[in-house]
Amino acid sequence: MRKVLCLLAVLLAGTTRLAVAGEFDTTVDMRANSATTFYVQGQIAGLGEVELMVDTGSGYMTINEEMLAELQNAGRARYVKELRGRLANGNEMSVPVYAIEALSIGNGCWLNNIEAAVFPGKTRAILGLNALQRTAPFIFSFEPPRLVLSNCTTTAEAPSSSHTADLAAFDAR
């Protein structure tokens, strides 16, 4: 029996994946507004500090029209596409999607070239799955409320010339 358990332990050890450098290296505290709503502090290059509602049910990060106007004035947002989606209340809506230059989740996790859907009016900014997936694997902890993120950079990186060319080519379509 002991030999079987040892063999099973060796086989299972071979199937588990060890964490590698860059995984789970950034912890961001969340503020719980209720039992189901969580917020993190963030920063958007060209906009400054923002509070982001963490929404794992939202496919896209969202910003509002006022935020977009500031980002465009700073030259830090480029139109990508029109997106048609279903809202939580069941209504369908078309919104523009813009690539924003850089987003910080907390003070230590910078992500570059993040797509954000733009909602009308003064709606709150949402940290959706398209941004969170870039930090995968990640952990969403309820107690204590925090995100543990991977694959973060510590500063916003300037776009490379090839990246800028790619965006320009995409815009020309």
Image: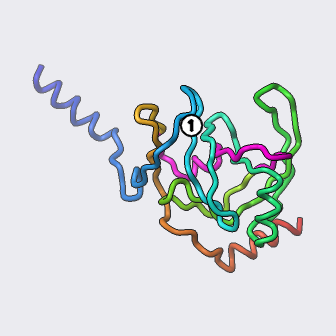
- Identify residue for label 1: 38
Please check the rendered image and state whether residue 129 is part of the magenta-colored stretch, yes or no. yes
**Highlighted range, magenta:** 117-139
Mark 1 surroundings within 10 Å by alpha-carbon count, few (fewer than 14), some (14 through 19), many (20 or more): some
Residue 52 at x, y percent in the picture: 63, 47
Q: What residue type is labelled 1?
A: Phe
Residue at the spot 27% in from the left edge and 38% down from the top edge: 13
| Local secondary structure at mark 1 | strand
Q: Which residue ends up furthest to the bottom in the rendered image?
A: 161
* Rendered view: 59 above or below 101: above
Quadrant in the rendering for residue 70: bottom right
* Rendered view: 71 above or below 120: below
Dividing the image into 4 quarters, which one contains the N terminus? top left
* Rendered view: 3 above or below 168: above
Residue 22 at x, y percent in the picture: 41, 58
Q: Name the foreground residue: 9 vs 33.
A: 33
